[in-house]
Image: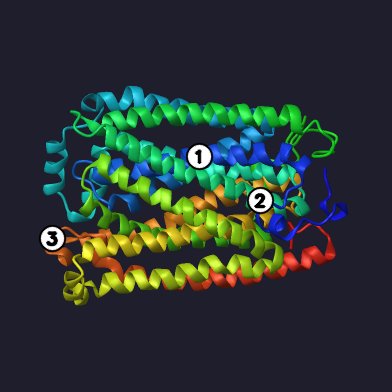
Amino acid sequence: MSDSDTMPEFGKIRKFFFPIYGFEVKKALPMGLMFFFILFNYTCLRNMKDAMIITAPNSGAEVLPFLKAFLVMPSAILFTLLYAKGSDTMSSENLFYVTIGFFIIFFGLFGFVIYPHLDFFHPAAATVAYWQDNCSGSVRWPLAILGNWSFALFYVMSELWGSATLSLLFWQFANQICKTSEAKRFYSFFGLLAQFSLLLAGEVADYFSKISRGLPDPWAVSLRWLMGIVVVSGIVLMGIHRWIYKYVLTDKRFYDKPELPGAKKKKAKMGFWQSMMFIVTSPYLGLIAALVICYGIGVNVIEGLWKGQVKLMHSNANEFNAFMGRYSFYTGIASMIVMVIGGNILRKFSWFTAAAITPALTLVAGSIFFSFIIWRNDFVGVLAQIGTNPITAAVFIGSVILILAKATKYALFDLTKEMAYIPLDDEMKVKGKVVVEVIGGRLGKASGAWLQSGLLMIFGLNVFSHGKKVELISLAPYLFGILVTICLVWLLAVRALSKKIAAVTAAGSNVVNT
């Protein structure tokens, strides 16, 4: 593997934008392309899942907390059990292909088999509406999920794609084949290249939404094209991964260990439950998990309320998806700008400084958003004078805030979190990461979802709602309190983890039990 410490210094401009030596492009570029295709699919799926489930008959943004709490989280646990078992019985390379293959088969079936025959698979919308009208308001939104069960399944699989392929498969692979000296230069490049996928995904969503307008079922046409693209992208992703194994990891300049990463062992070092107990008792991994969980809760409470306002502006799935495509496009632009800055922050400042920016920004920006939502009626006159209204203003403010939050997440939060894994041994990189990223990531979103769904169910009881439909916007003051609390906890966790990283860096020892 290359050691940049013995190589000549970059020029100032090269060091700022592209701190990678010419011979290292063979390793850095395909890794960046893997990140690109994973994030492209994730962005397409994220936009589509929200568009489908929020605009579905008898549904709304209020179903999201129930989906995340009671479907996504259990599915993440099941995936973790299966993945950990697979890591003991298969090589990392084969496990990668099996995992990606499972996802693209499902998305292909959904786009070309399930969605075209919804009348067969789903109960009638009138039937679901009857259920909702004759039941307590506290179960209104779970009934909406039942009535649109295939959309809910699509939502779950789309959520798992992000955790399984991006947070787990890609970063686990990168941490196995990259040294710390390479990570400081490569990781920001991976992220910067991947942000172009947000631009492409945004343009693709907007393009197919436009060309399908005026057709009998424009969303069906858009969905079929997008699912086809997602499947092809997944196949290309597997091809790049195979190329890296065949041509990069066999080059001693890039990978000089005696065996390929994650090669199948005759006997696993630890069983799954032993690994779980070992991970739970590791304060170091616990702090990484705390960062992931806090991010999930913080962004979740903002997004749910914001998407409810987006639905009021774009009530059908095709237009909702087009809006989310434009949102992804601008997120990509912001992420690329912040990625260049963030890469230099990682090289010039402490890990703590880079890691603390995301929670601090989320706290400040989220406070602005909730303050506007809570006191939105006080701004009606001012907004009318500039030709807008509270709904449009809420969507705009929320979009700007979430774009900034996502940009700093991609540019700083993800990179600093991944660097924290590098000192771990191979066993803990695999099993520790799957628990932290898949379960921890889902637990973060699920915790925010449990809080929101719990509030919706409590205030949906007739004794509180008086027969009225309870929506997330009426819970804004409570959600604001949750956001402030979780961001403060997040900052404390960043501080504690930075001390442990500094200690292990100075000692040069393994950190699993520290």
The residue that mark 2 highlights is 187
Quadrant assignment, res 260:
top right
Nearer the observer, 43 or 470: 43
Nearer the observer, 134 or 166: 166
List x then y, in percent, for residue 482: 40, 69
List x then y, in percent, for residue 169: 61, 40
Tell me the residue at 45%/31% (across/down).
230
Q: Residue furthest right?
A: 6
- Label 1 vs label 2, nearer the camera: 2
For the residues bearing labels 1 and 2, Cβ distance under 8 angstroms: no
Label 1 sits on a secondary structure element that is: helix
Is 105 left or right of 34, judged from the image as shown?
A: left
The quadrant of the rendering that contains the C terminus is: bottom right
Is 389 left or right of 178, judged from the image as shown?
A: left
| Neighbours of disc 1 within 10 Å: few (<14), some (14-19), many (20+) | few
| Neighbours of disc 3 within 10 Å: few (<14), some (14-19), many (20+) | few
- Label 2 vs label 3, nearer the camera: 2
Label 3 sits on a secondary structure element that is: loop
The residue that mark 1 highlights is 78
The residue that mark 3 highlights is 468
Q: Is residue 173 visible?
A: yes
The quadrant of the rendering that contains the N terminus is: top right
Image position of 82 with respect to 508: above or below: above
Tell me the residue at 33%/70% (across/down).
370
* Separation (CA) of disc 1 from disc 2: 30 Å
| Neighbours of disc 2 within 10 Å: few (<14), some (14-19), many (20+) | many
Tell me the residue at 60%/61% (across/down).
342
